[in-house]
DNA sequence: CAAATTTGTCTATTGTTATAGACAAGCAAA
DNA sequence: TTTGCTTGTCTATAACAATAGACAAATTTG
């Protein structure tokens, strides 16, 4: 919730007014400030509230409609389709489906691309492998209730997990693929979190509107022998997901 | 690091080209891809690389200069002032100065505003207080090496911490203020993480350029008796700070 | 010292964003 | 059924972003 008060919009900012308004509407939906009974105020009222032209508000709503967050109906009004962001926990055992349990009805991770090549230094450093080690990469998109919420690329030591792509294709889950490959359990070693503007690929694969923001994490998972097994970069639609950490039980 | 490859810029996206390029340059500085010997390639070379006009690149560099990340000198080149983002750990004991130890030379948190009033429901819910409880709020800006990296508003039960503003003014540290008020130690109960476009207040207080992105956290700290003592909203300059979590020692 | 390289500044044009108004069309309410 | 409300669409204009070119000024290089 935006508690730190102040001016809302900034002109000549490099971010179009409609994009700023889209972000505001999305945030205010989350806090309940924008919508009453699942419905936004009329376009003219939003234009007055934000001090912009009605066409500018329409452009913002169009962007949110494209992302599936809103639905406009002529003569009736604009309805909220996604009242709340998903809360994605980052903890000792960070898992996609289990982490979002109870917040959506269906979970799916699909493979977009895979490959095996000598990994770049950032990857080999993260996995504590000799420079130039061959690694398998999996590029995936994760969806809940048919809506993409994140895309990721993960690397694995090819010597150790050479056929993880095939197993993943069959199991549709990295956790299950690793279990098949002799890793019954693993934990999150570390995670870094940044935020960026969505790239054209993010927009395409995550079904975002132009100008959206993504939360970007880099992380390492390790097996119970403290060996790094997976290095990932994950990009989350910031309008659909918030990240969440809590005190771990001792 | 941007490993997920693809197109770099998106026209007509609602985010000005110069703003997108500023974000790219900043990310590429972080990964070492953009700068050699602490110096960017010449403006014309960047224009060719990104497929835009030299003036557009100059606007991007101007934004990063305004934020203190770059410094241009006529006839010489463009130099990197901030090669790396600060890595801010979020863990059991999340502390500003201790968390960034070793990454900067000076740390300072200054009070921007304080007040006492009936807290809104989000605050009382987070602090497990009866609705309408009076709370003290502290609005602060945190800086390292003279550069603002985050701004925050924190709430405390006024009945329990009524004079925390005065103590903070003297100690310049929430941790020390709480110690004075009978809380020698406390831990982070939970944290949520979102990303948004910087508001005009963010831009002013964090010395950001237009169109910048902020990482926004909401969090609760609790004392060792598991009582919630502090609820905060913190906004970090996403170009200056990344958040970091790691496996806690058992 | 001269040439080359690089940043800085100015003016001008084209493309995009935001505003503005008018009116159509669908739906809700009286 | 009529009126009022709300979204949808069209055209036009003003303001802003991006491109374009030219040239000045500072520094580096040969």
Image (spheres, coloured by chain):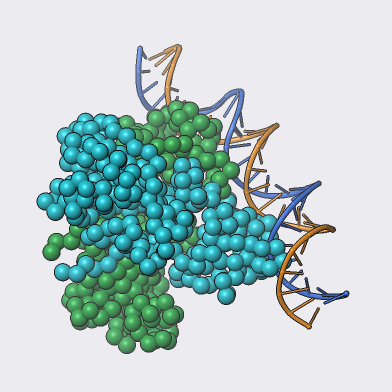
Chain colours: A cyan, B green, C orange, D blue
Q: Nearer the viewer, residue B249 or A181?
A: A181
Q: Nearer the viewer, residue B131 or B164?
A: B131
Q: Is the N terminus of chain A in the top left, top right, bottom left or bottom right quadrant?
A: bottom left
Q: Quadrant of residue B168?
A: bottom left
Is residue A29 shown left or right of residue B36?
Answer: right
Is residue B162 shown left or right of residue A144?
Answer: left
**Residue A116: x %, y % from top left:** 28, 33
**Residue B173: x %, y % from top left:** 26, 69
Is residue A200 shown left or right of residue C26?
Answer: left
**Residue A44: x %, y % from top left:** 69, 66
**Residue B108 seen in render:** no
Kindly identify the residue that appears in the image at 18 percent across and 53 percent down: A184
Count every numbered label the image shows and give the total: 0
Q: Compared with residue B196, is residue A34 higher up or lower down, i.e. above or below?
A: below
Kindly identify the residue that appears in the image at 53 percent across and 60 percent down: A69
**Residue B77 seen in render:** yes
Query: From this viewpoint, which residue is outermost toward the front?
Result: A170
Q: Quadrant of residue B76?
A: top left
**Residue A99: x %, y % from top left:** 32, 62
Query: From this viewpoint, which residue is outermost toward the left?
Result: A225
Q: Nearer the viewer, residue A177 or B201?
A: A177
Kindly identify the residue that appears in the image at 29 percent across and 52 percent down: A192
Kindly identify the residue that appears in the image at 21 percent across and 67 percent down: A248
Q: Is the C terminus of chain A in the top left, top right, bottom left or bottom right quadrant?
A: bottom left
Is residue D15 shown left or right of residue A195?
Answer: right
């Amino acid at each position: 919730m935006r508690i730190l008060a102040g001016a809302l919009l900034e002109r000549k900012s490099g971010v179009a007014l409609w994009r700023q308004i889209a972000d505001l509407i999305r945030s205010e939906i989350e806090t309940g400030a924008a919508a009453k009974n699942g419905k936004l105020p009329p376009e003219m009222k939003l234009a007055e509230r934000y001090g912009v032209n009605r066409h500018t508000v329409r452009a913002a709503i169009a962007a949110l409609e494209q992302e599936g967050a809103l639905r406009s109906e002529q003569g009736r009004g604009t309805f909220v389709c996604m009242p709340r962001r998903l809360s994605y926990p980052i903890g000792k055992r960070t898992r996609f489906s289990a982490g979002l349990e109870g917040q959506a009805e269906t979970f799916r991770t699909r493979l977009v691309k895979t490959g095996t090549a000598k990994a770049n230094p950032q990857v080999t450093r993260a996995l504590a492998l000799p420079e130039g080690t061959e690694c398998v990469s999996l590029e995936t998109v994760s969806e809940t209730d048919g809506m993409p919420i994140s895309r990721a690329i993960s690397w694995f030591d090819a010597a150790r997990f050479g056929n993880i792509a095939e197993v993943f294709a069959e199991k549709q889950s990295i956790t299950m693929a690793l279990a098949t490959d002799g890793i019954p359990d693993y934990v999150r070693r570390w995670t870094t979190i940044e935020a960026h503007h969505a790239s054209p690929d993010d927009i395409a694969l995550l079904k975002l509107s132009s100008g959206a923001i993504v939360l970007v994490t880099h992380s390492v998972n390790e097996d119970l022998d403290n060996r790094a097994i997976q290095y990932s970069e994950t990009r989350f639609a910031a309008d659909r997901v918030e990240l969440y950490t809590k005190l771990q039980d001792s």
